[in-house]
Image (spheres, rainbow, N blue to C red):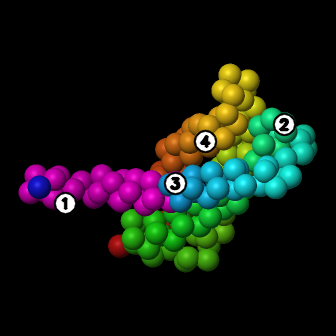
Amino acid sequence: MARVKEFFSKNPTAWEFAKYTIFSVIGGLLELVVFMILNSVLPQKGINRPINWFIFVYPAEAGGLGAFIAFIVSSVIGQAMKFITNFKKTFKSTNNIFLSAVGFAVMAVIIVVGLNLYVGGLLNKELCKVIANADIAGLIAKTIAQVTGFLLIFPVNKFILMRRKD
């Protein structure tokens, strides 16, 4: 344990990445739980009509509108939790929280729309062709989108949105 503490004290960016990972995993798990609940409940409640709007394609067999809503709501909840914890605990940012939140929101929209909704929807649709269970296919698609977003967001947060002025 002493070696771990020594390593992190000599490598503050590694410690930030470790905390970022922990908070992102917690936020990601929250996001997945919300997604699984909504993706299971909404289509069963009749919210499963196919959606093919703009870049979003969610056929009925992949959950349709219910899956689309599940992707959006779970993403917003997960991103909000990650912003708050990483701003305050990971990066201990001294940036203006309002400006950082606006920048994070723009980045989150790009990640949510680009990865979670567009790429997630494409993956979900294709996975449903080979996986009979739409819930499992959606979970796999959602996880792939989340991990990709995780890797992209850390450097943007650290070096742009959540800087600390020493």
Q: Tag on residue 139?
A: 4
Q: Are marks 1 and 3 in contact (CB under 8 Å)?
A: no
Q: Are marks 4 and 3 in contact (CB under 8 Å)?
A: no
Q: What is the x, y in percent for residue 2?
A: 9, 57
Mark 2 is on which residue type?
Pro
Residue 23 counted in the magenta span: yes
Q: Secondary structure at mark 4?
A: helix
Q: Secondary structure at mark 1?
A: helix
Q: Is residue 127 left or right of residue 157?
A: right
- Give the residue at mark 2: 59
- Give the residue at mark 3: 28
Q: What is the x, y in percent for residue 90?
A: 39, 65
**Does 160 sit above or below residue 142?**
below
Along the line of sight, the residue nearer the viewer: 60 or 144: 60
Q: Earlier in the sequence, mark 1 or mark 4?
A: 1
Q: Earlier in the sequence, mark 2 or mark 1?
A: 1
Magenta region: 2-28
Mark 1 is on which residue type?
Ser
**Does 88 sit above or below residue 67?**
below
Q: Earlier in the sequence, mark 2 or mark 3?
A: 3
Residue 164 at least partly seen: no
Mark 4 to mark 3 CA distance (whole Å): 12 Å
Mark 4 is on which residue type?
Leu
Disc number lying in front (2 or 1): 2
Mark 2 to mark 1 CA distance (whole Å): 50 Å
Disc number lying in front (1 or 3): 3
- Give the residue at mark 1: 9
Mark 3 is on which residue type?
Gly
